[in-house]
Image: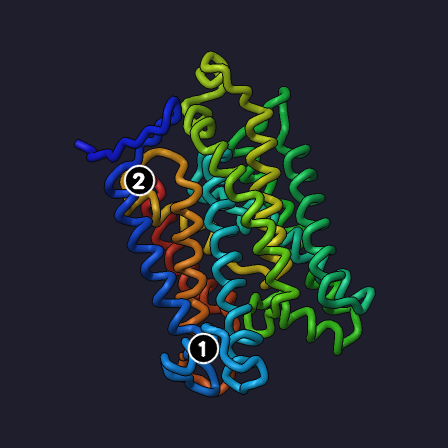
Amino acid sequence: MRTELRMSWGRARLRIEARSLALASALLALLLVLAWLSLSSGTIRLSAGRIWEALAGGSPDSADSRIVLGLRLPRVAAGLAVGLALGASGAAFQSISRNPLGSPDVIGFTTGAATGAVVHIVVFGASGRAASAGAIASGMATALLVYWLARADRRTGSYRLILVGVGVSAFLGALNTLILARGDIDLAVRARVWLSGSLNAVTWEGAGPTIAVVALVLPVLAGLARRLDVLEMGDDQASQLSVRPERLRIAAMLAGVVLTASAVAAAGPIAFVALVAPQATARITRASRVQVVLSGLTGAVLLMSADLLSMRAPVQLPLPVGLVTGLLGGVYLLFLLARFEDV
């Protein structure tokens, strides 16, 4: 029997399962710990007192303030925003496709966003905002292509969406490799570094747009969660309950693509966070509902944990966080596929 907390404000009513509330509290506490550890980690180790003094408004010209406010805090903010975006978009796409493998990186939206950035970097020699804009535009174009190819009889089939996405992802991955092989070697190296997925050089200029997109789009996607729950019962039943299935799919897919593209624009393609976060959330809470916010928080914890691990790994060079999530996510994917009949 599930324990629920019920709150009401006039006609508005809110029901929260105790297990979900406990998980949300634990995730928020973990995020605070991870953020503090990230602020103290790096070539120059800072004590808690020095970090607090910089955050509390110490001298802006001091070395501690420049390190904390100018270098490490943007990285923490970007990690939080990118993790939220990937976890929430993963929950949306897995609900739309009704498949645990239906994440943006599997369907091809992450690869599509990366293609736009690769073209801007290698072909046009652009960087910064231009590459980010290219990633967002290319991600949106990829989503439209996948949706158009997966649409049949005025409906988007769940397995058809996955298969079309895998095919588009394979094509775009090969295209990215071709562009890198034929482009200028210096620009290709810069693009390869970006493709590894990293938070190492993120500034407020790079993190700001992603933070704004998450603040605007995540509440919209969370508002669609209840109707996505109804949609998972099938199109016919959803239509009987006054839900327009295809219009809802388009709205949820659009929100998910915007979140994914903004995350890729800020940090490059980060693998497996969007795949793992919704699954881990569902297994912990044992809830069948679409949990957009909780999945986003789980994604943020996973990404920030991987980033902290990349900074503290016993190697000579800093590891890109995309490599760490790829290693850990690959193990989880093998586990998921081995138990595919149970998920």
The vertical placement of 75 against 172, above or below, is below
Residue nearer the viewer, 167 or 23: 23
- x, y percent for residue 260: 58, 50
Q: Give the amino acid type for the residue marked by disc 2 in the picture.
A: Asp
N-terminal label among 2 and 1: 1
Tag 1 secondary structure = helix
Q: Label 2: which residue?
A: 342
Front residue of 330/84: it is 84
Which of the two discs, 2 and 1, sits closer to the camera? 1
Q: Position of residue 273 (x, y in %)?
A: 46, 55
Q: Residue at x 69, y 55 (%)?
A: 135
Please give left or right for residue 23 compared with residue 303 in the image: left
- Left or right position of 134 against 321: right
At x 47% / y 78%, what residue is drawn?
Answer: 54
Q: Residue at x 56, y 30 (%)?
A: 249
What residue type is disc 1 on?
Answer: Met
Question: Could you tell whether 146 is left or right of 321 in the image?
Answer: right
Determine which residue is flagged by label 1: 311
Residue situated furthest left in the rendering: 1
Are the two marked residues, 2 and 1, in contact with CB atoms closer than 8 angstroms? no
Q: Secondary structure at mark 2?
A: helix
Vertical relation: 54 (above or below) 213: below
Considering the image in quadrants, where does the C terminus appear?
Answer: top left
| Residue at 51% across, 70% down | 73
